[in-house]
């Protein structure tokens, strides 16, 4: 049933989107596939900001189209193919679940360039890209370590995948770097987007004494639930300060714009080739929202931490790091390599939770 | 510990409230003999129109009124199709859910990412500040009290008023009620409209109180839970509250257990209310007299006047 509605939505959306964009033929047509609506103020919103940045920067040479609310999995194949069929030469598919469909469509359209966000499979005309969000989470941890009075932080986690586990670990390492007494309570909600459930999780964590809430889910519900009780929280994927002016400490802002511009330029220059990009603060793909609702010295420390990560002076996963069993996984003087980060499926020492398997 | 317990009970009550509204409405519709599977769609309709009305006017009461009216209107589509045109109730109800999901997404396009002033918990001087019982009795948001009053009123209406008895008679034996001269179809229209209005209110509770935002498909299956709840309560209002606290509360308990690090698998806890429903169904179906006492006999059957 749900599928049927979504399919109609796709059909409608693609019809609308595609009729909107058939003007000048000499411009490079760039297509985007979105998981949610651009107005979600989270994941999709951030990608749409990237698209707008691309239009602003290269408006004379590119023309963009997007299709929103495309469900992950096989259904997305038609939406992607539709973009390819209608002359789009560069297509960004912006969610993990579009991996197989993207690869399949890419095989049928060898002259079209595809960019798949957060995936790990590439081909001659499929690149992957993702951001080092954990760098921002480390900074959030530092802030939480300084701001929390109850020394209890609530963490709303979506699915037990490396991306999320890495965020939890980075947050804890950041928090413990300034306050070893911080306890992290983790709740798994098994969804990216279910506002009432996200709010439930926030409430439960606050019931159990958390005075800071952070989340790896996409809606603003948890932030708003924290605001209702006067507890601090972090925004996710975009600056959500507008939803909770007195609550948000900062937010990880996913800044895709520079990457989208660079890739479109590469297609225009004819220099595009399949690549695997994992950029962070240094490249400007991860940006912190302004540090608000904290004292000046905490804000200064947060800014300094972010700057050290940006310059490379500080690595969030610098040794010595032990896992929960107390075994050293990153020795002193070393940093976790990308292989370990990409496949991270263990908690570091100090996380007060058992990782669901 | 007491603080945690009180806080958990408070959170459970808010989780139960949208279910109480939707289930009470559906219960009345089913007692009149109409099975409306469109609860989820009507909840979404109420949620989006309630939110839109508050965004436009800033008035929570107008938002709630809009949700009630639009929920009832959505149910009237179902009413016309099943009661006047005698279409299949199951299929039409499912269609109503699909329709409500799509309509709410369309109407809600402009309201995604908007913020409104949330309807907050009440605070009575002295009473709310009483130790322990203060917050439990006097610290909820206004709609929690409305939902409990609604349950009480529904119970009283069905059991102790003449029209309540007529409504039950219509659900138990439409032909006899018709033969005596009661307007079966009109009564069913009224019951369905009430069901739609309450589902709309339950949806608005989510978008105005629970999380003050609109998101596509934000009821996330709570309409279906409300339907299961009516069966769980074996069509008795007095049991709806218990069921709603159990169904809504188990999610909260599950999250609490995780946050406390108890190591109980989340999926196991989430499964419990559904297992409970199946157990209740099996228990009440085992005994044929009990079924006759509980389930409305004409549930889901279209009514054609014989004379």
Image: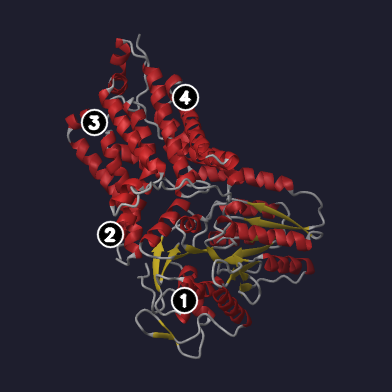
Res. A179 image quadrant: bottom left
**Disc 4, disc 2: CB below 8 Å?**
no
Binning the other alpha carbons within 10 Å of mark 4 as few (below 14), some (14 to 19) or many (20 upward) gives: some
**Chain letter of disc 2?**
B
- Picture quarter with the N terminus of chain B: bottom left
Q: Are marks 3 and 2 in contact (CB under 8 Å)?
A: no
SS for dot 2? helix
On the same chain, marks 3 and 2? The answer is: yes
Looking at the rendered structure, the secondary structure element under dot 1 is helix
Quadrant containing the C terminus of chain B is top left
- For disc 4, the chain is B
Of A215 and B74, nearer the camera is A215
Q: Which mark is residue B294?
A: 3
User: Label 3 is found on which chain of the structure?
Assistant: B
Say which mark, if any, is on residue A175.
Answer: 1
Q: Residue A22 placed where, x, y %?
A: 76, 49
Residue assigned mark 2: B2
Residue A185 location (% of width, % of height): 39, 68
Which of the two discs, 4 and 3, sits closer to the camera? 3
Mark 1 or 3, closer to the camera = 1
Cα separation between marks 1 and 3: 57 Å
Judging depth in this view, the residue of B173 and A134 nearest the camera is A134
Q: Do the residues at pointers 1 and 2 share their chain?
A: no
Q: Position of residue A194 (x, y in %)?
A: 47, 53
Q: Which residue is mark 4?
A: B81
Whether discs 1 and 3 lie on one chain: the answer is: no
What colouring does the structure picture have?
A: secondary structure
Circles 4 and 3: CB atoms closer than 8 Å: no
Q: Which mark, by number, is residue A223?
A: none
Residue A282 versus residue B232 in the image, above or below: below
């Amino acid at each position: 049933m749900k599928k049927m509605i979504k399919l109609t939505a796709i059909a409608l959306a693609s019809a609308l989107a595609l009729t909107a964009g058939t003007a000048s033929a000499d411009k490079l047509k760039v297509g985007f596939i979105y998981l949610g609506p651009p107005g979600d103020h989270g994941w999709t919103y951030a990608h749409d900001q990237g698209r707008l940045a691309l239009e602003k920067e290269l408006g004379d040479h590119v023309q963009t189209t997007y299709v929103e609310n495309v469900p992950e999995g096989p259904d997305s194949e038609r939406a992607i193919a539709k973009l390819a069929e209608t002359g789009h030469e560069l297509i960004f598919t912006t969610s993990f679940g579009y991996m197989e469909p993207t690869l399949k469509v890419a095989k049928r359209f060898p002259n079209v360039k595809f960019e798949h966000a957060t995936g790990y499979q590439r081909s001659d005309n499929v690149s992957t890209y993702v951001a080092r969000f954990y760098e921002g989470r480390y900074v959030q941890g530092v802030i939480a370590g300084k701001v929390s009075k109850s020394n209890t932080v609530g963490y709303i986690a979506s699915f037990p995948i490396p991306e999320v586990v890495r965020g939890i670990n980075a947050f804890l390492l950041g928090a413990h770097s300034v306050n070893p007494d911080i306890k992290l309570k983790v709740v798994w909600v098994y969804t990216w987007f279910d506002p009432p459930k996200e709010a439930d999780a926030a409430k439960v964590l606050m019931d159990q004494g958390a005075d800071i809430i952070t989340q790896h889910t996409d809606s603003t519900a948890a932030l708003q639930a924290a605001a209702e009780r006067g507890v601090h929280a972090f925004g996710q994927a975009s600056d959500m300060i507008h939803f909770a002016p007195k609550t948000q400490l900062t937010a990880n802002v996913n800044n895709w714009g520079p990457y989208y511009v660079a890739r479109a330029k590469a297609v225009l220059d004819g220099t595009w080739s399949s690549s695997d990009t994992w950029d962070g603060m240094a490249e400007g793909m991860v940006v912190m929202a302004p540090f608000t609702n904290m004292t000046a010295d905490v804000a200064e420390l947060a800014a300094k931490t972010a700057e050290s990560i940006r310059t490379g002076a500080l690595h969030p996963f610098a040794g010595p790091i032990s896992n929960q069993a107390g075994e050293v996984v990153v020795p002193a003087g070393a940093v976790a390599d990308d292989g370990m980060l990409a496949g991270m499926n263990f908690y570091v020492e100090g996380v007060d939770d058992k990782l669901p398997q | 510990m007491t603080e945690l317990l009180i806080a958990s009970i408070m959170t459970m009550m808010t989780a139960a409230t949208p279910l109480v509204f939707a289930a009470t409405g559906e219960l009345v519709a089913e007692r009149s003999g109409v099975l409306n599977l469109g609860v989820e769609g009507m909840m979404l309709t109420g949620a989006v129109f309630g939110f839109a009305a508050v965004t436009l006017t800033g008035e929570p009461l107008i938002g709630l009124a809009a949700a009630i009216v639009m929920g009832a209107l959505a149910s009237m589509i179902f009413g016309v199709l099943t009661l006047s045109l005698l279409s299949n109730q199951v299929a039409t109800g499912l269609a109503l859910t699909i329709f409500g999901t799509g309509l709410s997404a369309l109407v809600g396009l402009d309201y995604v990412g908007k913020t409104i002033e949330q309807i907050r918990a009440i605070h009575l001087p002295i009473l709310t500040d009483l130790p322990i019982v203060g917050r439990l009795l006097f610290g909820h948001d206004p709609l929690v009290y409305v939902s409990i009053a609604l349950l009480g009123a529904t119970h009283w209406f069905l059991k102790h008023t003449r029209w309540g008895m007529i409504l039950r008679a219509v659900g138990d034996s439409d032909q006899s009620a018709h033969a005596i001269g009661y307007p079966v179809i009109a009564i069913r229209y009224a019951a369905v409209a009430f069901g739609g209005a309450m589902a709309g209110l339950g949806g608005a509770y989510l978008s105005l109180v629970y999380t003050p935002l609109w998101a596509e498909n934000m009821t996330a299956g709570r309409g279906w839970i409300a339907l299961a709840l009516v069966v769980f309560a074996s069509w008795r209002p007095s049991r709806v509250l218990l069921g709603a606290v159990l169904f809504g509360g188990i999610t909260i308990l599950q999250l609490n257990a995780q946050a406390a690090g108890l190591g109980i698998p989340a999926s196991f806890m989430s499964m419990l209310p559904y297992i409970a429903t199946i157990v209740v169904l099996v228990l009440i179906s085992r005994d044929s007299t009990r079924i006759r006492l509980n389930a409305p006999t004409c549930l889901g059957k279209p009514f054609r006047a014989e004379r």
